Image: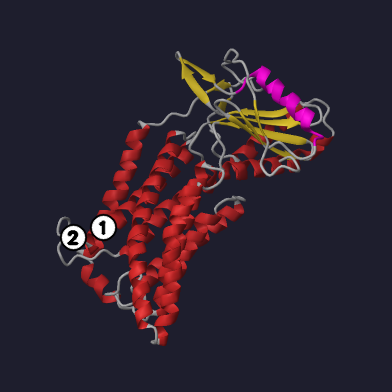
Amino acid sequence: MINGFSKPLKLVLKLEPVAEEENSPDTGSELFEYEHGIKVVYKAAIAIGIGVFGTILLAWILGGPLGSIMSDIQDGAVYHLIPFLFSVSVFGVLMYKAAVKNIRGLEFLSSAVLLHGLAELLNVISPPDPSSALFNRSDDFLAWIGDIMLPMAVFLVYLHVELIEKIRPGLLHGVGIIGTAAPLIIGGLIIAFLTPLGRFDDLVAEIQKLVNVYLAIFALVILWISVFGLRVMYRTLKHADSPDVSNGSLLVLIGFASLLTNFLLLGFEYSSSQTSILFSDDFQVHNTWLLTFALIAILTAYITNPEFAYSVPFDVYQLLVINSEQGITLFSFINEFRQKGGTMTHSALKSPAIVAIQNLVREIAYAEGHIILIGMSDRILIMKSRGLIVTVLIAEQNSYFINKGLEDFTKRFYEEFEEHIVNFMGNVSVFHDATKLIRAHLPFMRKESLVAT
């Protein structure tokens, strides 16, 4: 960002295409492309099917064969204690693994899980009446506070999903969700505090009607977020560069399909026809348990592979580390390849374009401020600087999590190779070990990109 300007400076480069190369000029390694075992659309369909039918099966088990047991424990603390223990345990494991591997950018997702766990904890302390509906808790103060945490948790999940493919949340989406969640939060707080006083019954009744209206609208918002999450994860699966990213995308697809099914089942239960279409009339959907199942499915992707947090639903082509004083490329990693005419070729920028980028970096090295984004016709250059180096990531688009990863990579690269950078004498081979930093901070880069010949 240039001092004196409120927005990043965007430049447009027009570069002529040059002949494709079959091998990396830096390593002489053969290039291979990660291929899915089966078509992506079939993979996604299987994952969504598992999420849908797995949730229906779990709902049937809890409401059918285990229905009497669930009814017996529903009045007590154990009904909410089990989801609470699951949520908090998963949250703890996720935070531990993220801390060990220095994974940043999980704030929104982890906060949503924590809010869900706290809501269940409040219900453990003061179990609500099983006959009471969501946001209709009579005079149970703690249950009202627990309900208020739901829209906040949902909004945080939305932020996490949207920032996977964007640098900042969409204004219209954000306003729409906040516009339906805020009345629930504010109205719920007013009712929770006024009801115990017993002197504002008419006001509480009117606010309750308003809350019920917005609760119905917010239910539609949750359905939209679930579909939105399915779309983003499908794109992430489609652009997966490694088995880890592919498997993580499948797990999150299962989670969002489960979340979607959960609210559809809840809608059936509250409808006038009850659930006779799928279940018996006395069938009960244990929403808390099903919601916990969906969250665990999503979080499993991050627990088994915390670096999944940096996965992106678009193409990432190449990473460059350039000496800002001399304009020399210290390290280069090619990521995106395309199959053309039976020959594997990479579609990243070629030598003339790289020379242009090197010259640009050298020219702006001593400029006041930093250029952080360069836009081109079909891709962008994301730039981070530290000390005497500038890292350049060439990608189809930018996102919040890709910035987190590139920022971490730039910092660690400079710390690890500072001596060689400061005393650079032209030997770039000393930077080849930086590939391990890619694995740690830019895990969306395919592990199968470069296979030594």
Residue 443 highlighted magenta (yes or no): no
Indicate which disc residue 275 carries.
2
Circle 2 packing at 10 Å, graded few (<14), some (14-19), many (20+), is: many
Q: Is residue 353 magenta?
A: yes
Residue 189 image point, x, y percent: 45, 74
- Please tell me whether the stretch drawn in magenta is mainly helix, strand or loop: helix
- Above or below residue 444? Residue 57 is below
The residue positioned 49% from the left and 64% from the top of the image is: 114
The disc labelled 1 sits on which kind of residue? Leu
The residue under the point 43% across, 37% down is: 235
Q: Secondary structure at mark 2?
A: loop
SS for dot 1: helix
Q: Compute the Cα span from label 2 to label 1.
A: 8 Å
Q: Where, by quadrant of the figure, is residue 326 drawn?
A: top right
Which residue is depicted at the point 35% across and 63% down? 215
Give the magenta part as a residue range.
349-367
Q: Amino acid at mark 2?
A: Thr
- In the rendered image, residue 286, in percent from the top left (x then y), is placed at 29, 65
Q: How is the image coloured?
A: secondary structure
The correct choice, above or below, for 137 with respect to 434 in the image is below
Q: Which quadrant: the C terminus?
A: top right
Image quadrant where one finds the N terminus: top right
Can you identify the residue that label 1 sits on?
265
